[in-house]
Image (cartoon, helix red, strand yellow):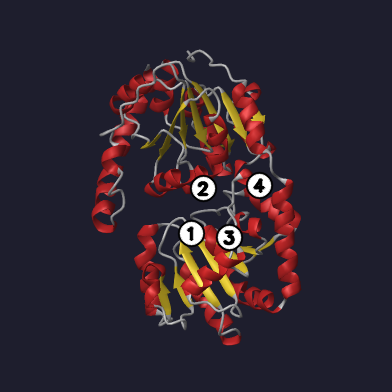
Amino acid sequence: MLFSFLYEISIWLLALIAIPKMLYQRWKYGKYRNSLRLRLGYDFPRIDKGKRPLIWMHAVSVGETKAIAPLAKLLKTLNNPILVISSTTETGHAEAKRSLPFADHHVYLPLDFKGTVKPIISQTKPDLVILAETDFWYNFLNESKKNGASIAVVNGKVSTRSADRLKKFSFFSKPLFNLVDLFCVQNNIYKKRFEEIGVPENKLIVTGNLKFDEDYTKLTADEIKQWKDLLGINNDEMILVAGSTHDPEESLLVEALLKVWNKYPNLKVLIVPRHPERFNDVASLLAKKHLPFVRFSGIHSKTGKESVILVDAMGVLRKCYQLADIALVGGSFTSKVGGHNIIEPCWFGVPVIFGPHMYSQPELLDLVKEYQAGIQIEPEKLSDLLCELLSNNEKKNSLGQAGITLVNNLKGATHKTLTSIKELKPAPLPE
């Protein structure tokens, strides 16, 4: 009772800080325009379970949503459940509709006020709650548990930073994690970290990384040609795709490219920022640098002489990677993020470059290094590496083939996770 009371006070204090900021970003950048009202619990769908089981799967954003899609598809075949998919971000919500069109409901996870969450959970009465990776909210989990749900974490991970914080604040982490019946974690590194923050070993199982089992649709040769034609790229031009970039990575990239273009003036660069609210900022940067560029949203105004194409659209990054001779994955040249999915280009045999900050993706870093499928580089050496790869087809092809081998060797996490979940029995609410 005391913990619940203190938690509720903390949530309201956080809301006093967060909600004004969200309102400002909604006004200034259009962020949260479609989600703020829904995250406050308004207009939540009325769900009539009948006699069907209800599975609620929650994924924060785009990457986690893509990762759980194969698992969700398999769960949907069991006992004809009602499948509810919740997201936190608007980009994650849009991705859920793309990747999981078979779900019965696509919703936003309500902000974790007890007065908001309790009536929603009392109405839906989920039988199974599945969290992807890291997003834990006490009231959501506690109310689900009170209504008889089993709770599982899939693709579980915890960074060194988070583990250190959780160990210091065990009065918070212990009651939170006690609500979870099963942790399906990506590897032994994360298993050990969860143990160190107090999760019992009998709740932990290593099932692998679901991201390796994603269904990556590959373009045909004709489709690749159509995409290049649309973008104004000739077959004899080389392509660098910079995906999931953050501030200030575009600036770092442009500085490196100014040197590369002196040697390879026909190099085409596709920049795909991670967050849509930054599209205009990146466009302003390119204009300020006097670079010939076109936005994807205005691609029909292209001349074909542009050096840069700013991909100001969501859900097309994988198509872009399939056009690439080289891929650069962002979030790794800034210490604020700590890396994204550097395995993604490997599905398509594209060599991958990434920066020094990969602390949030240690497993992916180890795998790419082990298989020699990509290269980690400091930003000041980026121009030299790009020139080397653009001139060395043998090295480029070797990295690409190593990436394909990596991906093929690491599949199977979805079925391991499903087997573990099927054996799950709901535990009583912790004291």
Quadrant of res 54: top left
Callout 2: SS: helix
Q: Nearer the viewer, mark 2 or mark 1?
A: 1
Residue 219: mark in rendering: 3
Q: Name the residue under label 1.
A: 316
Q: Which amino acid does label 3 sit on?
A: Leu
Callout 2 amino acid:
Gly
Q: Nearer the viewer, mark 2 or mark 4?
A: 2
Q: Dot 4 corresponds to which residue?
A: 363
Distance in Å between CA atoms under marks 1 and 4: 25 Å
Left or right of 255 in this view: 215: right
Q: Residue 33: x and y, percent? A: 27, 49
Question: In what element is the residue under mark 4?
Answer: helix
Does the CB distance between marks 4 and 3 fall below 8 Å? no
Whichever of labels 2 and 3 marks the residue nearer the N terminus, that label is: 2
Dot 2: few (<14), some (14–19), or many (≥20) neighbours within 10 Å? Answer: some
Kind of residue at badge 1: Val
Q: How far apart are marks 4 and 3 (CA)?
A: 28 Å
Mark 2 → mark 3, Cα distance in angstroms? 20 Å
